[in-house]
Image (cartoon, grey):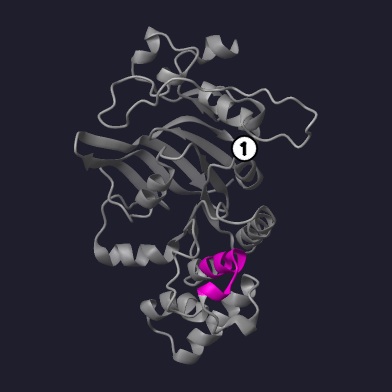
Amino acid sequence: MSNTILDVKNLKKYFKVKNGMLHAVDDVSFSVNEGETIGVVGESGCGKSTLGRTVLHLLDNDGGQLIYRGEDITKINNKKLRNLRQKMQIIFQDPYSSLDPRMSISAAIAEPLKLKGGLKKSEIERRTEELMETVGLASRLYYSYPHELDGGRRQRVVIARALALNPEFIVCDEPVSALDVSIQAQVLNLMQDLQEEKKLTYMFITHNLSVVKYISNTIIVMYLGQVVERASSEELFNHPYHPYTKALLSAIPLPDPHVEPNRILLEGELTSPINPKPGCRFAARCAYATDMCKKNQSLVEISKEHFVSCCRVNEINNL
């Protein structure tokens, strides 16, 4: 049986804005097992990236708990946070903007090793060469700069840098969305190979449902800062229950041009994430919304390990 590496309980992250508090992440709970991938999907602005950054303490949380390998890391001092950074890393969406254009790629990969300390120059160089080989970067690129590489190679540099300190858990914040489709497949295959080889655990953030289905064990669907559905990848795609999840899945392009897609078009205005009222935040765009939806919603287990936040889920799906 897999061990839980990360347990997130009722996590909250708010931002103070002119008109009040923006609820970017609001009462989010999930857990991920060692060596597995949890996918996080939703529209732009739903809080996916903020969730990833809050989990890594790049942003301070405003409530809830973060449990890493059984230890509460919700509030930790700088010394413990520095040690934690070695175990938890991030791969950003845009490899070009996440690399210093003035540093060669070998210097970028070696930087975490230098910051950690305790290694000789020759050891750092050897480790850098090993990391380049691991992610499929030719040794001739050792002194190259980011602008001299294509997007796929730049992302491999970012992955190598993330692996430098032998982490256990990596937040992948839309790591292939800025790449061409053919390059996306190469990077995804590399990430899966590395996961199997090094027993890595991923939190994979994306808006691409085809990608998240390919790489994830479990998927959580977010809408305006909240989780509306959580299930295994296979279960979610075979039996989506929440109206928002169904709409997302209907938008996936079909490979056969002769098959007419059954699109679910969402109408209505987005609910403001600033000082949101109680109730379902999707109600304003939901065809099934009633007065019941104005009450606070919570995730309910519809079937084994399949959770949905919808008070009318039984009626809508005839369960």
Classify residue 26 as left or right of residue 207. Answer: left
Kindly identify the residue that appears in the image at 37 percent across and 39 percent down: 9
Kindly identify the residue that appears in the image at 32 percent across and 31 percent down: 273
Q: How many numbered marks have been drawn onto this rendered protein structure?
A: 1
As drawn, 47 above or below 237: below
**Residue 62, quarter of the rendered image:** top left
Report crowding for label 1: few under 14, some 14 to 19, many 20 or more residues within 10 A (C-alpha).
Answer: some
**Residue 129, quarter of the rendered image:** bottom right
Element type at marker 1?
helix
Classify residue 202 as left or right of residue 17. Answer: right
As drawn, 179 above or below 129: above
Badge 1 amino acid? Ser
Quarter of the figure with the N terminus? top right
Question: What secondary structure is the magenta-colored segment mainly?
Answer: helix
Classify residue 311 as left or right of residue 202. Answer: left
x%, y% of residue 234? 66, 35
Kindly identify the residue that appears in the image at 67 percent across and 57 percent down: 189
Q: Along the line of sight, which residue is nearer the eye, 40 or 285?
A: 285
List the residue tagged with mark 1.
Answer: 233
x%, y% of residue 169? 48, 57
Question: Magenta stretch containing residue 203, yes or no?
Answer: no
Asked whether residue 154 appears in the rendered view, the answer is yes
As drawn, 233 above or below 180: above
Quarter of the figure with the C terminus? top right
As drawn, 158 above or below 92: below
Asked whether residue 319 appears in the rendered view, the answer is no
Magenta residue span:
146-158
x%, y% of residue 300? 46, 22
x%, y% of residue 224? 39, 32
Kindly identify the residue that appears in the image at 39 percent across and 42 percent down: 8
**Residue 77, quarter of the rendered image:** bottom left
Q: Along the line of sight, which residue is nearer the eye, 230 or 205?
A: 205
